[in-house]
Amino acid sequence: MKEREKATVTAAPDVRIRVFDSFDGLEPAWRTLEREGFAYAFQSWPWVTAWQEHVGERAGVVPFPVLIESAAGEPLLALPLGIRRAGRVKVLEWLGGVLSDYQAPLLRELPAALRSQEAFGALWRRVLDDLPSFDVIHFERQPATIGPLENPFLFPGSTLHPSRAHSTGLAGTLDDFLEAKRSASWR
């Protein structure tokens, strides 16, 4: 396991942050979050590791995936992060680049102590302290929700893309959907 030496064991009450410089040793926790938590296909183990191997590495993206666990070792969040150079600027971003429609963490329902924006912001600052240096954070194409959970990375001042990530809710019948979304002449 290539866990960074700088990684700390404290972050917030009963939470441990681990920053890695590769995906070595992360698969069991990552797959647990896939099974028991919420994510999009672009954060699945096969997708994100294949993207890093075949696209990210060639583009000079250095992966720094982050695992946030409870004190009992239960994975709470996995952050597929990486740093790439854009000229002289080092950019922290979600792995997946332009090939991923949604960029977000894998997560479970967070403990009550981390659900407020203030508490999550404090946790995020601790993550940032453990990452190697970078110049800019560039998070884009973030959905408002991940499964039924609010995306904790939509900090105050964040704006959603006007397209709202090309998604639509499905409820009721096809006729109900078409009535809500299409004109009578189209139907």
Image: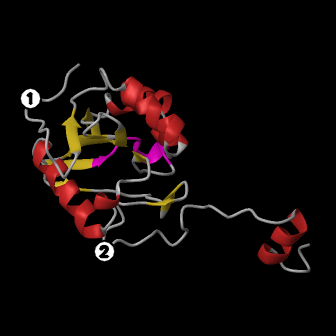
Which residues lie in the magenta part?
A: 93-100
Which three-letter amino acid code belongs to the residue tagged 2?
A: Pro
100 sits left or right of 5 in the view: right
Describe residue 149's horizontal placement relative to residue 26 as left or right.
right
Horizontally, residue 107 falls left or right of residue 119, namely: right
The quarter of the picture where residue 28 lies is: top left
Identify the residue at image location x=35%, y=54%: 111
Report the disc number at residue 5: 1
Residue 154 position, x and y percent, is: 36, 65
Residue 138 position by quadrant: bottom left
**Is residue 94 covered in magenta?**
yes
Q: Nearer the viewer, residue 100 or 170?
A: 170
Q: In this view, does 61 lie to the left or right of 174?
A: left
Can residue 84 be seen by looking at this rendering? no
Magenta includes 62? no
Residue type at numbered disc 1 = Glu
- Residue 153 is at least partly visible in this image: yes
| Image position, residue 133 (x, y; %) | 9, 45
Q: Is mark 2 on a helix, strand or loop?
A: loop
Q: Distance between the residues labelled 2 and 1?
A: 32 Å
Name the mark on residue 156.
Answer: 2
Q: Which of 19 and 109 is in front in this view?
A: 109
